Image: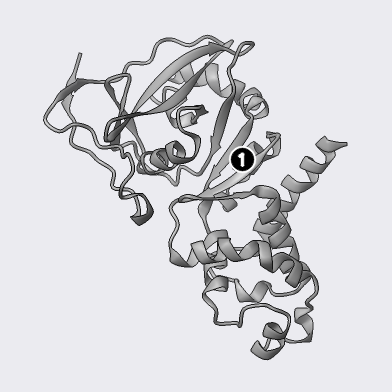
Amino acid sequence: MPYFTASCSLTPGPRHQQTSSNIVTPMRSYSRFVYSPSASNTIRLLRVLRDEDQLRYCLSTFSKDNIPNFYALSYSWDGQSRDQVILCDDTLLAVTSNVQKLLPYLHLEYKSNYIWIDAICIDQDSPIDQNTQIPLMQIIYTKAIKVIVWLGESDARVDRALEAIPELIPRLRGFDGRLGLNDDRMMSHGLPKRSDEIWHGTRDLLSRSWFTRLWVFQEAVLAESVVVMCGNRIMNMDELVDFTASMASASVVDLTRDTDSDFFAVLTGLAMVQRISLSKEW
């Protein structure tokens, strides 16, 4: 069996400098992770565990009829190659940079709960395993107690936008941008002026690649409960949907328009999630 010397590590963002990370003990040899064969009635679930100053991972197999409570992740691969490693069951498992970065944030919020992540729970090097597991994804996203939409790491502008969204929703509902988007008028309605970083942060948030992928919207549609996670910030998907809908009805979309993104495509996708979620309640 091949052996590797682990040298890859993850340094979390400023908010997480004192927390566990994906640091693998250097200069120690680990064997490569080998998946056990899966059956059409089983799924694998990941647990993120803390081991002193580093994170380690355990992958377990369960019958689809006897699955423990678990969370499912929805995210965009962004075409990344699996050139990073994590320590899973005391062996090295190759993952993308995106997945490696999100794991410490998941541990901060969800501790050692079971999590389903396609890039880890499905053997990406085995067409046989993919053919067995991919048909189960509808069941997985339906049975998850919550689907976590990972939008990537945050920054100061996006943090500020996420903090402001709950207060902006009712203010946007009472505003009509068609009558003018000048600073005085906006501020009189309790809205930030045009140049405020909140609008830039909103644009950056809604420009994340997750919003441009139809199939990940479908993952959110299947779920009973959906949250959006950006760095260590978490928001209910319903709240983000309300915010984008309020922006559209208030005609302030131009404040966040970006030549590289299509706000109306984002709005359509989020509205689809909301409509189907409401139909489930009935």
Query: As displayed, is residue 261 above or below residue 109?
Result: below
Residue found at x 50% / y 44%: 76
Report whether 94 appears left or right of 251. Answer: left
Instruction: Locate the N terminus by quadrant.
Output: top left
Residue found at x 48% / y 11%: 38
- Please rate how many residues cluster around mark 1, counting C-alpha atoms within 10 Å: few if below 14, some from 14 to 19, many from 20: few
Element type at mark 1: helix
Report whether 171 appears left or right of 28. Answer: right
On the image, the x and y values in percent for residue 134 come to 56, 24
On the image, the x and y values in percent for residue 218 come to 66, 39
| Residue sitting nearer the eye, 63 or 170 | 170
Residue found at x 51% / y 28%: 116
Q: Quadrant of residue 27?
A: top left
As shown in the figure, which amino acid type bears the numbered disc 1?
Answer: Trp
Write down the residue under mark 1: 215
On the image, the x and y values in percent for residue 57 come to 36, 25
Q: How many marks?
A: 1
| Residue sitting nearer the eye, 102 or 84 | 102
| Residue sitting nearer the eye, 208 or 124 | 208
Query: As displayed, is residue 215 above or below residue 14?
Result: above
Report whether 48 appears left or right of 211. Answer: left
Q: Give the residue furthest to the left.
A: 27
Residue found at x 57% / y 40%: 148
